[in-house]
Image (cartoon, grey):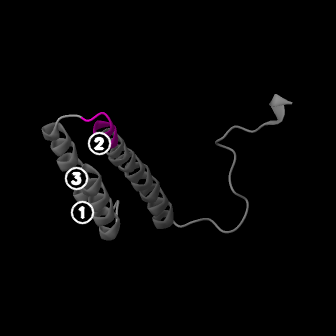
Amino acid sequence: MADEKKPAAEKKKAEGPQKRPSALKRDLQNEKSRLRNRAYRAKVLTAIRGLEQGIAQKEAADALKQKLSSLFSLMDKGVKNGVFKVQKASRTKSRMAARLA
């Protein structure tokens, strides 16, 4: 049974016309940016989780302000790079600041 499987190099889509080189390049670019954005979102979620844990464990106010500041920075950079929309960043920042207050 395993002998009947073709190597990955021989497998090609038989359906439809071939994509142009520019479309193939765009697919590669989209995949790279998708992975980059996904990693960035994970970093932001980790920062949010760390802040919430700090609030739950009643850490010192200075440490919590530092975590909040770094979260704000991450969100603003995410907006600048197109990972987040402006309103999502504003909403998240507002909620985190309210939880800290």
Q: Residue furthest top?
A: 2
**Badge 3 local density, few (<14 within 10 Å), some, or many (20+)?**
few
**Badge 2 local density, few (<14 within 10 Å), some, or many (20+)?**
many
Three-letter amino acid code at disc 1? Lys
Three-letter amino acid code at disc 2? Leu
Residue 48 seen in the current view = yes
On residue 80, the disc is 1
Image point (73%, 63%), residue name: 15
* Residue 57 inside the magenta-drawn segment: yes
Residues marked 2 and 1 touching at CB (< 8 Å): no
Question: Residue 58, image x and y in percent?
Answer: 26, 35
Question: Residue 62, image x and y in percent?
Answer: 13, 39
User: Which badge, 3 or 1, comes first in the chain's sequence?
Assistant: 1
Boundaries of the magenta span: 52-58
For residue 1, which quarter of the picture? top right
* Left or right: 54 as drawn, with respect to 26: left
Three-letter amino acid code at disc 3? Ala
Residue 78 seen in the current view = no
Viewer-nearest of discs 3 and 1: 3
Q: Secondary structure at mark 1?
A: helix
Magenta residues, dominant SS class: helix
Q: CA distance from mark 2 to mark 1?
A: 22 Å
On residue 41, the disc is none
Q: Which of 80/59 is in front?
A: 59
Query: Does 32 appear above or below 47?
Result: below
Q: Which of 68/10 is in front?
A: 68
Question: Residue 14, image x and y in percent?
Answer: 73, 59
User: Which badge, 2 or 3, comes first in the chain's sequence?
Assistant: 2
Q: Which residue is mark 2?
A: 51
Q: Which residue is mark 3?
A: 101
For residue 95, which quarter of the picture? bottom left
